[in-house]
Amino acid sequence: MARLVMKFGGTSVGSVERIKNVAQKVKREVDAGHEVAVVVSAMSGETNRLVDLVSDVASLHDAREYDVVVSSGEQVTVGLLSLALQDLGISARSWLGWQVPVKTNAVHGAARIERIDCAEIIKRFDDKQVAVCAGFQGIGSDNRITTLGRGGSDTSAVALAAALEADRCDIYTDVDGIYTADPRIATKAAKLDKITYEEMLELASLGAKVLQTRSVEMAMKHRVKLQVLSSFEDLPGTLVVDEEDIVEHQVVSGVTYTRDEAKVTLQQVADRPGVAANVFGALADANVNVDMIVQNVSEDGKATDLTFTVGRKEVTQALAVLEKLKGKVDCKAVVPDPNVVKVSIVGMGMRSHAGVAKTMFAALAEKGINIQVISTSEIKVSVLLAEEYTELAVRTLHTAFGLDAA
């Protein structure tokens, strides 16, 4: 007998028929003798609808009331799934965030979980009852409903699994696992049997949409074993595990990309101490997140081009910050470029293999793809490219590192 947390996203509970399908999957685990807690999102599209309603009523809204409205989608799905389980003869009850309770801070719209009191849920496991819990929501220190931010149901599931000391947390989605690349681009992408927390965290932060970044961070911190698998097909999924649970590491485990990048270049900036501190300090004060940075000094050492990337939605704000710096930071021009993409390779094997970057750069050069910015960590290399090369770059790197399925 195991203790399981099963999480189902919006597409998995997108209709009554799909909710009944989820109930059958839960019943199968209960019939196998397992203790089961289920975490569900709102039905697909419902959270967007609720967010739009809030915006229609008040463009500048009270974040506390925003949370009251947008958290209501999960209340519907926990109730419907509990009813579907009861209809199958399974003892089940719904739990909203404040009922568990899931204690969070009071940052409405982007709350962080502080602790979960699972005593009552565990007590009911003894009576073979399934706990159907609302994802995405909790209760803040101000005793009001909070939400965890978009994609927060994954985080809810992992946090609940950690609090319950569950044997595994199964994340059911509309894909059947984690692939070496986006199969829509790299048609020879292969599904991974296992991947490490560190690799999954890098992939999630670099554009892979399968798991939310915060949920992977939490799983790694609390050593919650994750499994990603399909809601719609009975196929083996992908396990996210400790490094020691994988016998032999691929040099590169995956290739991913994100189009949510924009490049900003300050041309002919005076090359003197404090300039970079002024630029990036002002951006930080304005909560503009800077990712990749490169600096090219001129031959005479008097001027430099300073290039960095920000999220596409933050370009306007970044430019406004730089405009206010005129006088403190002199430059010839500020040139934004939103037509870029960040392509990355990730793999634990990079730590013990030389020449990974050389292989990457040579493969891209052979296809005539120019690299604009480079950033690295111990287990990843990211490059900034012109957006038009996205698909070619992903396929090229997937082949170059031997990831094409036979």
Image: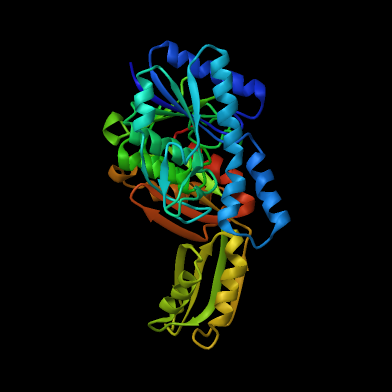
On screen, residue 276 above or below 19: below
Q: Residue 373: give x, y in percent of width and height.
A: 49, 61
Q: Residue at x 50, y 50 (%)?
A: 144
Q: Residue at x 42, y 53 (%)?
A: 141
Q: Residue 133: give x, y in percent of width and height.
A: 48, 32
- Look at the image and tell me in which quarter the N terminus lies: top left
- Front residue of 386 and 56: 56
Q: Residue 62: give x, y in percent of width and height.
A: 60, 59
Q: Residue 123: give x, y in percent of width and height.
A: 34, 25
- Front residue of 129 and 162: 129
**Which of the 4 quarters of the picture holds residue 88?**
top right
134 relative to 35 in the view: left or right: right
On screen, residue 23 above or below 294: above
Disc tally is: 0
In this figure, which colouring scheme has been used for the structure? rainbow
Which residue is situated farthest in the bottom direction here?
A: 327
Q: Residue at x 55, y 55 (%)?
A: 64
- Front residue of 372 and 117: 117
- Front residue of 88 and 141: 141
Q: Residue at x 62, y 23 (%)?
A: 18
